[in-house]
Image (cartoon, rainbow, N blue to C red):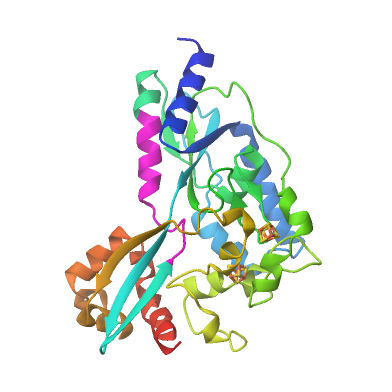
Amino acid sequence: MSLEQITKTLYGRIEKQGYKGKIVSVEHVTELQEEIEEKHHRGLLSEEIYREVLTWVDFKIPEISPEAKSIIVIAVPQPQVRLTFNWNGNSLHCLIPPSYNHATDGQARKILEPYLKSKGYRLAEAKLPLKLLSVHSGLAEYGRNNISYVEGMGSFYRLAAFYSDLPCLEDNWRELATMQRCEKCTACLKTCPTGAISSDRFLLRAERCLTFHNEGQGEFPQWLDPSWHNCIVGCLYCQKICPVDKDFLNLIEEGPIFSHEETASILQGKPIKKIPKETITKLEELSLFEYVDILGRNLSVLFQK
Ligand code: SF4
Ligand code: SF4
């Protein structure tokens, strides 16, 4: 089978699942790194955000035999998930925005790996700045809110990326692109309660974004009005108002219900050992376990609302 046929079949398998993907040359890893460094150098990425990026990004290309030649970036549709917390006779429904559930990373890998392996190629996880990569690959475009949008999915998806020794037949790398729709729209700018989206620069003031604060540890800053929180983690205001997302807003999956005891254990910030096992399982299945230390803080703010 020719390389052209293999690449075509790979794209076909991705599309068949309802996913979307693009392949770029591995040579662009250096450019991704330089772009992040440059933003930091120009003061467009605060020290806190820069440090956070470096905790999960790794620009070192893993050794795969014979050597990585391409990066495959995949978008997998993901809905919002509605959780129900019961406490003191009250039921609170709250949402997890799309993109939090890691399970789709494994699903994307399952589509790619067996096929590539059958053709003698290998795959390894790529811990890269995925949003930036997806826009450079042509898979997504940036919105004014700095969220990336994929045709047919809006912003309701999660990205995953993999290195492969599959040669990159067609390098899809391109300059960063923003949605044409944003030229005449300021809906997200007007709706964002924190002023994170500004008219004088394209890059989000990430240090003002609710997501940065409610995913992080510690007390919320003084300027942050607690009533602005609208999700157990993250924030949905600028996605919900975006016209590009209007067809995807009803994609809400019913998530688990947490009993009074379970909710109390989260609200009280109990140590992991004292949280009921079934609660831990629920959080793990939602990919929320990594936030276990901050869920009590976030949930109590939502209950007060
Ligand atoms: S709300 Fe309008 S300006 Fe903001 S990302 Fe969507 S289309 Fe662009
Ligand atoms: S996620 Fe929320 S806080 Fe962040 S830019 Fe969008 S609306 Fe503003």
In the displayed structure, 183 sits above or below 23; it is: below
Residue 1 point in image, percent of width and height:
45, 9
Residue 266 in the figure: left or right of residue 185: left
In the displayed structure, 276 sits above or below 173; it is: below
Taking the image in four quarters, ligand 2 sits in the one at bottom right
Can the viewer see residue 129?
A: no
Residue 221 point in image, percent of width and height:
57, 85
The residue range painted magenta reads: 96-113
Q: Which residue is at the front of the view, 157 or 68?
A: 157
Residue 240 point in image, percent of width and height:
56, 64
- The image quadrant of residue 283 is bottom left
- The image quadrant of residue 274 is bottom left
Residue farthest to the top?
A: 1
Residue 222 in the figure: left or right of residue 108: right
Can the viewer see residue 190?
A: yes
Residue 108, magenta (yes or no): yes
Q: Residue at x 46, y 21 (%)?
A: 9
In the displayed structure, 239 sits above or below 133; it is: below
In the displayed structure, 287 sits above or below 120; it is: below
Q: Residue at x 26, y 64 (%)?
A: 282
Residue farthest to the left?
A: 277
